[in-house]
Amino acid sequence: MKNTWTLVEHRAVKVTDKYYDEALHIDVKNMLTLDADRLLAGFRETAAIIAGMDDEAKKEFMKGKERYGGSWENSLIGGHTLGHYITALAQAVGNPGLSEAEKKDVDARLDYILDALMECQKLTEGSQYEGYIFGSDFPTKEFSDNVLLQFDNVEKGLSDLFTQAWVPWYTMHKILTGLNAAFIIARKETALKLANNLGLWIAKRTEGWSEETNKTVLSIEYGGMNDCLYGLFVINRELKEKGSALAIEDLKRIFDAAHRFDETELFEKILSGKENVLDNTHANTTIPKFIGALARYEADTSQAKYLEYAESFFDMVVSKHTYVTGGNSENEHFGKDYVLDAERTHVNNETCNTYNMLKFARRLFAVTGKKKYLDYSERTLINAIMASQNHETGFTTYFQPMATGYHKVFNTLDGNFWCCTGTGYENFTKLQRGIYYRAEGKMLVSIYLASELTTDDYKLIQECDLTKSEQVKIIITPNQGKNIEDDLWLRIPEWVADMPRITLNGKDVDAGVHQEEKDFIVISKEILSSGGELVLELPMGLHYENLPDGKTTYAFLYGPYLLSARLGTAKMKTKSHGVQVSVPAERAVESDEIKLTDAGSVDDFLSNIERYLVKRQDEMEFDLKGTDHNLVFTTHYNQYRECYGIYWKIGQ
């Protein structure tokens, strides 16, 4: 595998940035406030039905609890939140940013859920349902009489969300992914046993499909079933190589089941690069399919065509369908190529899409070593993921409007179990992911964020806050009796205004620059062998971007930070949209047009942007001057209290 990098182990990195640390803790507080028995209610009811319990016994087995409401968990998609929740808890268990008391609580919660699911799964032993766990609602007697009815209906192409099937394979993907994470990150053997039993149930189901049935199943949203099954295959392969008794004996069944969810016809269609090939495609249905294509390559590097599929899709989304935040989509769908300005509305940038694209980018970097994936990752983490949380409540967004004048709308604690609620729980328990990567003899600093990295040989501390200073301090201290045996790679961000300057212990460093594109600064292990204090200066400044179909429509950034204008709270009203999703109802401004009053031309305004968008001293607040609008811009990631404007049409 060329340029193989791996994300540094989850437990090895602690984020110390105050804002990020607060985001973690409020997320964990919200997760622990939820009632685990209500999230488990559907799984227990399913198992009770399989076991033939009467109503009284079933109620007792369910602890007298009902599913959460809100038209998601108490519907045919019920159970998807628990899959995300398991992943988020596993990440929290392995997150060194938590206190011992918090770790104890999240660990106990995760154990409780896994033990409950194992109790459910054991009730299926010896039956036709062996290994099956699921948590959807039973809206009619027909569904409770046949707990697999949703899966049967999908195989017949029946997919009405309320009466037939609401993407059961999508939900299964969330459940299996959570179990994989609980084993990999939180080291829970119970999770692996659950995953293996469930994986064999899935394999058995797929083995009964005809080619026609398989194609029908792939026509209905199935999440990243290929991704989680290839992931389960890799887990078991590694265990088998170590001689572990936990491994599935016949791994080929899992690998073949994963391939049943590889939609090669779609992959080839994207690889063709035809014009508007993604038009009117549901974005979050599509992105996980290509993460699954990448997973096939990760599992078997001889499958190089699948890496081509993955890279071509990623490039298509970023180049033709992505906003300045790193997010994409309008009302959950991709539009025509390069049509973005015309589709700026109150329902852009579904958070699930952003979550998936960020995951995708990090894994693509790991197998290719291409810096563009790191640039995308930084931008998206700061300006879309961090921008998706209300920093006071910890609740998160479904959409992030790109039309000027709207505000963000957040879920509630127990009433909005949207798909993006689950990904929201995950996002803020893994904020250390993607800061550091390692390869043989190399350690890479990918994102400049205050954090601590602990390895067997040394400790690396980043001290920085780019909202306050262009300076990044990196302190490397070898462990007693050790030397530093890694070259240190430092990513050169796409946004730097000039080449970074670096010193070691106060003296300029003779650092190499890797690749003609000047992607990374490389400091050799010989220079760093005994450690020291590195200071990296990252020249920052204002820059701007427009949209391909909106050449006069501009967004402004300062260094890595997207800026948005403060537009007040007077128009912060909401309405319902789609399946019980809350969205903004009104705009704070009638128009996003700005007329210049001082600059001779738009080109003059942009080429001298620091004269017209003036940064306040020691603040990330910028006053717009020389126009007919008195606007104050600020960092978009913490714009959660009022309406905002990212894109503005500038003219004379």
Image: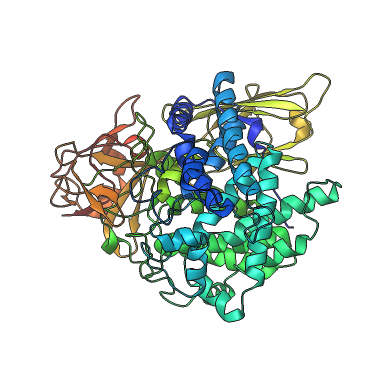
Which residue is drawn at the image coordinates 72% and 24% (left, top)?
A: 531
Q: With 204 as the anchor, is 484 left or right in this view?
A: right
Q: With 561 as the anchor, is 443 left or right in this view?
A: right
Q: Nearer the viewer, residue 58 or 512?
A: 58
Q: Nearer the viewer, residue 30 or 344?
A: 30
Quadrant of the snapshot with the C terminus: bottom left
Q: Nearer the viewer, residue 48 or 113?
A: 48
Q: With 417 as the anchor, is 532 left or right in this view?
A: right
Quadrant of the snapshot with the N terminus: bottom right
Residue closest to the far right = 243
Residue closest to the far bottom = 212
Which residue is drawn at the image coordinates 58% and 25% (left, top)?
A: 103
Question: Can you see residue 217?
Answer: yes
Residue 612, percent across and down? 25, 40
Residue 219, percent across and down? 48, 72
Q: How many marks?
A: 0
Colour setting: rainbow
In this view, 22 is above or below 305: above
Which residue is drawn at the image coordinates 12% and 51% (left, top)?
A: 590
In this view, 131 is above or below 261: above
Residue 122, percent across and down? 65, 47
Residue 448, percent across and down? 54, 35
Q: Nearer the viewer, residue 90 or 168?
A: 168
In this view, 2 is above or below 605: below
Question: Can you see residue 368?
Answer: no
